[in-house]
Image: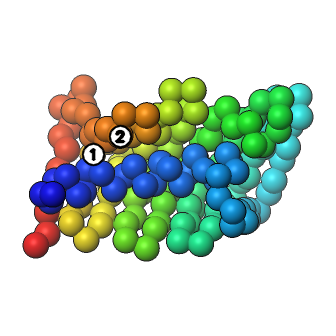
């Protein structure tokens, strides 16, 4: 496995953990702390706002705001997960940061937007957008319409 393969695969771990947080796939408890918590039953969403921290063993997500939209079966029936403002996802061997993260369980796609940085022992990749397709196992930093480029720095 070359360095590019190692660094390209690791974002999938981030997506899998985010998805599992609200899908009940982990046996461990999920702890969410925030300055404010609002549940709107009529809109089927829950909003955590202000210094949001989502933790599980071996995983932490920070954001200014996290909105979870759910279906008829409540929070275990995840419709969307949106993290906004200073998003940081940390695992023991990897950290990803961006301004916004959105997960759509129907398409099984996680997208990190704006100022995306993924750092692990293999190196660093930066770009304006990272698309992770959970179903196909493909992670992509697309080129930007404004001419912005993706930068990868690989370590030895």
Outermost right residue? 41
Q: Residue at label 2?
A: 137
The residue lying toward the viewer, choosing from 116 and 15, is: 15
Q: Is residue 135 above or below residue 101?
A: above
Mark linked to residue 127: 1
Of helix, strand and loop, which one carries label 1?
A: strand
Tell me which residue sits at (27%, 40%) in the image: 141
Residue 154 on image: x %, y %: 14, 63
Q: CA distance from mark 2 to mark 1?
A: 19 Å
Of helix, strand and loop, which one carries label 2?
A: loop
Within-10-Å neighbours for mark 2: few <14, some 14–19, many 20+: few
Residue 86 on image: x %, y %: 50, 56
Residue 124 on image: x %, y %: 23, 61
Within-10-Å neighbours for mark 1: few <14, some 14–19, many 20+: many
Q: Reading the chain from its start, which is encountered first: label 2 or label 1?
A: 1
Q: Nearer the viewer, mark 2 or mark 1?
A: 2
Kindly check if marks 2 and 1 are in contact, taking CB atoms under 8 A apart as contact: no
Tell me which residue sits at (14%, 69%) in the image: 155
Q: Quadrant of the N terminus?
A: bottom left
Q: Quadrant of residue 42?
A: top right
Residue 38 seen in the figure: yes
Q: Is residue 7 left or right of residue 14?
A: left
The residue lying toward the viewer, choosing from 29 and 153, is: 29
Tell me which residue sits at (51%, 27%) in the image: 107
Q: Is residue 43 left or right of residue 129?
A: right
Q: Is residue 125 above or below residue 140?
A: below
Q: Quadrant of residue 80?
A: top right
């Amino acid at each position: 496995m070359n360095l590019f393969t190692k660094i390209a695969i690791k974002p999938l771990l981030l997506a899998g953990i985010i998805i599992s947080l609200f899908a009940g796939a982990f046996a461990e408890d999920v702890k969410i702390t925030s300055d404010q918590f609002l549940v709107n039953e009529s809109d089927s969403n829950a909003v955590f706002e202000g210094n949001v921290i989502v933790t599980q063993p071996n995983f932490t997500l920070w954001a200014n705001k996290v909105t979870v939209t759910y279906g008829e079966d409540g929070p275990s029936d995840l419709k969307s997960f949106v993290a906004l403002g200073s998003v940081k996802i940390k695992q023991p061997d990897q950290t990803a940061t961006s301004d916004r993260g959105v997960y759509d369980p129907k398409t099984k796609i996680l997208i990190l937007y704006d100022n995306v940085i993924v750092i692990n022992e293999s190196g660093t990749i930066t770009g304006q957008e990272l698309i992770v397709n959970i179903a196909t196992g493909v992670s992509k930093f697309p080129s930007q319409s404004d001419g912005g480029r993706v930068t990868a720095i690989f370590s030895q």
